[in-house]
Image (cartoon, rainbow, N blue to C red):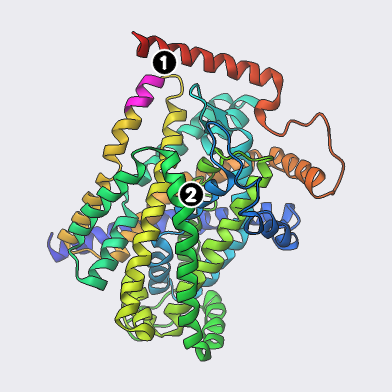
Amino acid sequence: MYKGERKMLSNILNGINDFLWGKPFTYFVLFIGLYFTVRSGFFSIFHFKHILKNTFGSMFSKEANSKKAGAVTPFEAVCVAIGGCVGCGNIGGVASAIAVGGPGAVFWMWIWAFFGMTVKCVETTLGCYYRSKDETGRYFGGSTYFMEKGISREMEFTKFGIGLAIAFGIGFIAQFLGGSQAYTISEVLNQSFGFNMIAVTVAYSLVLFYVIWKGTPRVAAFASKAVPFMCTLFIIGGVALIVANYQNVPHVVAMIFHDAFTGTAAVGGFVDSTVSQAISIGVARSINSNEAGQGSSPLIHGSANTIHPFRQGIWGSFEVFMDTIVVCSITALAVLCTGTWEEGYTGATLTIKAFEKVFGQFGSIYIGIMCALFGLTTTAGWYTYYIAVMRHGLRYKPILADKIELLFKFIFPLPNIIIVSSIVLTGNGPDLFWTIVNITLVAPVFTNLLGLFILRDKYFKLFKDYKARYMGIGEVDPNFFVFYEDNPEIKKAEDAVREKIKAIRDSVYQS
């Protein structure tokens, strides 16, 4: 592809991104976050101690590791979810946000993380409440489930609820064409070790295939071991870098807050950014990183053996805190404290250069290892999300669902190879790539947040019930159904559907 053609493609995609992530959509996203945060009484702030106690503080408790047939443990679910959101976006995406939107973008990342702790709790709670057990005994939940059962059935917005679920499902699954983790991994390992980016992607795809081959159980087992290790290791390395540049921290923090409302003037290799750019890029990158509002992690949280939907919801709040307030902030402060953001680098290369300034060549190797772990856990986690959406869409065609699930295991790694090869061979860079990632976010984020707002009353009933049962705030309603299928009439209807689908499966496999 010639230079002029590459520039034209870049201009077209940037134009689409600017239109989709313009003020109306960005303000809509922030409004939803603000609404739930305020109406919940700022639960994530005033009851943060309760969140930590029942998440981080209970990781090794019997409740967090309780498992039953067809489900994963609450701890496994959050490890898959944290693995799904703590990915290469935390290394390459955050750096890219600063490179394009300036230091002010970090402030807006924090703002969405603050709102996102509540939004992730809402979508996880509703995804768990409306979850289903399929004919094989496996539990599935998530946005398509609360759209179908909550909006279409309970609220009797039949066509709208089904249409919203279909639109979300199509938009969500389309994201697997992006290959964002593979691109950043190949970029980092190319910078760190000089490895060929396409060769790295092929090798990475083979390892990924091995992890996903046995489905959600293997992914959950892998994540429960890899995620605590990789997060701890990254936090230690990042804090060490920041401490080494502690004298720059006050200035950097002041710059983040100042530029969030004034924009950033051009310095070094950096291009001017406006306030609107900082807001849209910061919010978009925050959603891409912590996935609050994207409707992704509820798809694994819906499989958790939890005592209450809201209890799993606060695990969702915890993962946003870990992803953005902790991990993303470390990357952002590393890039800003070392001054590398002014030197014209973009993407993961910017993060690598920041760590090299303090740790030399070891810093490059360290980021290479971190990126490989982050990317693998994220992509494997997202495989379970796609399967949950796909199996819901094909619920009444179990044989076809089995065949597509098997086929998807082979197809899933391929976009990694295609997207990385096309970017490398056409000479495009990471900024264009992250623009594509932003574009793919719009459909699932919009449909998911709209669904949450429509079901807001159901969420706050679950919220009220949890506080009464487990926090001693209010009185417990003995007639309240904690899960959708706790209602005997609904369970009877769902069991009939499961039996019908099971009969179809048995008739085919026994013939």
Element type at marker 2? Answer: helix
User: Residue at coordinates 41% horizontally, 36% vertically from top-left?
Assistant: 387
> Quadrant location of residue 391?
top left
How many other residues sit within 10 Å of disc 2, few (<14), some (14-19) or many (≥20)? many
Q: Which quadrant of the figure contains the N terminus?
A: bottom left
Q: What number of labels is visible?
A: 2
Q: Which quadrant of the figure contains the C terminus?
A: top left
User: Residue at coordinates 37% horizontally, 50% vertically from top-left?
Assistant: 379
The residue labelled by disc 2 is 80
Task: Give percent across and percent down for residue 342.
Answer: 37, 83
Specify which label sits upstream in the sequence, 1 or 2: 2
User: Residue at coordinates 84% horizontally, 38% vertically from top-left?
Assistant: 476
Task: Determine whether, in the image, residue 353 is placed left or right of residue 443.
Answer: left
Q: Are marks 1 and 2 in contact (CB under 8 Å)?
A: no
Task: Give percent across and percent down for residue 340.
Answer: 37, 82
Q: Is residue 96 magenta?
A: no
> Quadrant location of residue 186?
bottom left
The residue labelled by disc 1 is 505
Q: Residue furthest bottom?
A: 247
